[in-house]
Image (cartoon, rainbow, N blue to C red):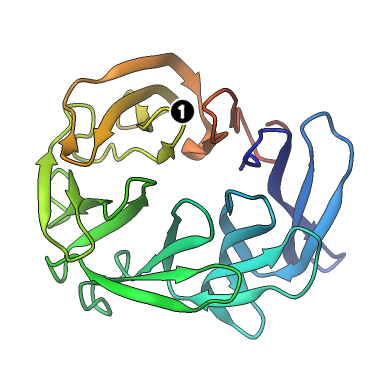
């Protein structure tokens, strides 16, 4: 993931011993390759990293001793990671994050926690309804608004819902590019007030189109702008700086290139 100003990148690096036992360490460095700093070691696995908007903390998803799974926060100056909760997360503007069980329907009670990253304090809980559905949240900088990507069953195509913090649905759209089996990773770009998604071109393969949708307090606009076409995104991994000027992505095996 990119730092807010786009000058640094955070990533996970795999470390294996002679017996084949592997862990990960969390690293930040300049996009020019300088200033490398290891923030955390002995991470069981890691699937996502995100910076808060002032660049002082990183949030990462994965597992960390003692056998905890979910979201963690660590200072970009170093220190012990703080456990924020299970299981999925997305960052809002500033120091606020959303924690949900949307990827674990059997455990989910249909609520998303809104917390502050630096101290792990819960601000409130937002009902997302559709208990038992698979969903994930997309944090916005629009006050009292949250996007929830919902799929009611494995066989149904997902939809995007704009809701307020009381859980009321403002509007919903079913994007034509977000068909069954082709869910798209998403990033909110506050400087442009746009939701940017990496849409897979087919059910298999690594080629994706980078698409953008305008979002306001009253709705998600259905028109879709194409930013890039045919970008080779390994595992769909990409990120955008908050000013919308820089994009980073994995172009092949994680061991070789960003």
Task: Give the residue number, with chain letter if any, for mark 1.
Answer: 206
Placement of the N terminus among the 4 image quadrants: top right
Q: At 33% from the left edge and 23% from the top edge, which residue is drawn?
A: 201
Rendered position, 241 above or below 232: below
Horizontal arrangement in the rendering, residue 7 relative to residue 176 (left or right): right
Question: Does dot 1 land on a helix, a strand or a loop?
Answer: loop
Instruction: Please report the residue visible at 29 percent of the width from the left and 74 percent of the height from the top.
Output: 125
Name the image quarter holding the C terminus: top right
| Rendered position, 200 above or below 129 | above
The residue sitting at 70% across, 31% down in the picture is: 257
Position of residue 246 relative to residue 4, above or below, is above
Q: Is residue 65 above or below residue 145?
A: below
Q: Is residue 152 visible?
A: yes
* Rendered location of residue 195, percent (x, y): 35, 34
| Residue positioned most to the bottom | 66
Location of residue 193 in the rendering, given as x and y in whole percent from the top left corner: 36, 32
Image-based side of 6 in relation to 135, left or right:
right
At which x and y percent is residue 187?
43, 39
Tally of numbered tags: 1
Foreground pick, 136 / 96: 96
């Amino acid at each position: 993931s990119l730092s807010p100003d786009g000058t640094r990148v955070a990533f996970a690096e795999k470390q294996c011993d002679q017996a084949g036992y592997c862990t990960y360490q969390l690293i930040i460095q300049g996009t020019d390759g300088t200033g490398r700093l290891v923030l955390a070691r002995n991470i069981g696995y890691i699937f996502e990293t995100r910076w808060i908007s002032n660049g002082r903390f990183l949030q990462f998803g994965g597992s960390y001793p003692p056998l905890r799974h979910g979201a963690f926060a660590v200072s970009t100056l170093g220190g012990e990671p703080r456990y924020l909760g299970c299981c999925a997360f997305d960052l809002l503007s500033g120091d606020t994050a959303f924690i949900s069980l949307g990827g674990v329907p059997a455990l989910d009670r249909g609520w998303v926690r809104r917390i502050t990253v630096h101290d792990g304090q819960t601000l409130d809980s937002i009902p997302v309804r559709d208990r038992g559905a698979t969903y994930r949240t997309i944090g916005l900088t629009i006050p009292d608004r949250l996007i929830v990507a919902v799929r009611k069953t494995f066989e149904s195509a997902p939809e995007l819902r704009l809701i307020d913090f009381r859980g009321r649905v403002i509007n919903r759209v079913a994007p034509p590019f977000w068909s069954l089996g082709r869910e798209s990773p998403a990033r909110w770009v506050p400087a442009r007030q746009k939701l940017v998604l990496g849409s897979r071109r087919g059910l298999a393969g690594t080629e994706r189109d980078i698409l953008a949708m305008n979002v306001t307090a009253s709705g998600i606009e259905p028109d879709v702008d194409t930013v890039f076409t045919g970008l080779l995104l390994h595992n769909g991994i990409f990120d955008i700086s908050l000013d919308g000027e820089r994009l980073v992505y994995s172009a092949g095996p994680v061991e070789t290139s960003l």
